Image (cartoon, grey):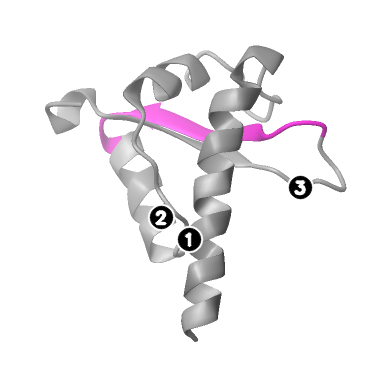
Amino acid sequence: MTDDKHKKAAALKYESAEDNAPRVTAKGAGLIAERIIELAKNQGIPISEDPDLVGVLMQVDFQEEIPPELYKAVAEILAFAYGLNRRMMDND
């Protein structure tokens, strides 16, 4: 992700009551990636940069659950996000 023209982003959503695994809810490159990141920041959604994982997530169809081989990598990111949310709530 050295320049904005080649920047890529993917967004995931996971509802444990509804989903078996996280779903890809947005993905794109260039200006679309910038917009995804901007929206996440504006909503206070934690952002994790992992270009290799984003590259694989770009291959998952929109609204599809991630494949099982990505569970571990995505679980680490979700744990990171939940930890940030917990810390923010504790500081309030």
Q: Secondary structure at mark 1?
A: helix
Q: Position of residue 17 (x, y in %)?
A: 87, 48
Q: Earlier in the sequence, mark 2 or mark 3?
A: 3
> In the rendered image, which residue does mark 3 sit on?
15
Q: Which residue shows up at 46% across the image and 30% down it?
A: 27
Report which residue position mark 1 lands on.
84
Taking the image as drawn, is residue 83 in sight?
yes
- Which residue is drawn at the image coordinates 12% and 28% (left, top)? 3
The crowd level at tag 3 (other Cα within 10 Å; few <14, some 14-19, many 20+) is few
> Which of the two residues, 86 or 33, is positioned nearer the viewer here?
86
> Which one is earlier in the sequence, the residue at label 2 or at label 1?
2
Q: Is residue 9 above or below residue 82?
A: above
Coordinates of residue 54 in the picture (x, y in percent): 42, 24
Question: Which stretch appears magenta?
Answer: 20-31
**Horizontal side, residue 17 vs residue 56: left or right:** right
Which numbered dot is residue 65? none
Whether 29 is among the magenta residues is yes
Secondary element type, mark 3: loop
Q: Please say if 41 is above or below 52.
A: below
Name the residue carrying label 2.
Answer: 39
Q: Amino acid at mark 3?
A: Glu
Taking depth in this image into account, of 89 and 30 the one nearest to the observer is: 89
- In the rendered image, residue 69, in percent from the top left (x then y), is placed at 64, 13
> Distance from label 2 to label 1 (Cα)?
18 Å
**Does the rendering let one see residue 25?**
no
Identify which amino acid the numbered label 1 is placed on: Leu
In the orientation shown, which residue stands out farthest toward the left? Answer: 3
Residue most extreme to the bottom: 92
| Up/down of 88 relative to 80, above or below | below
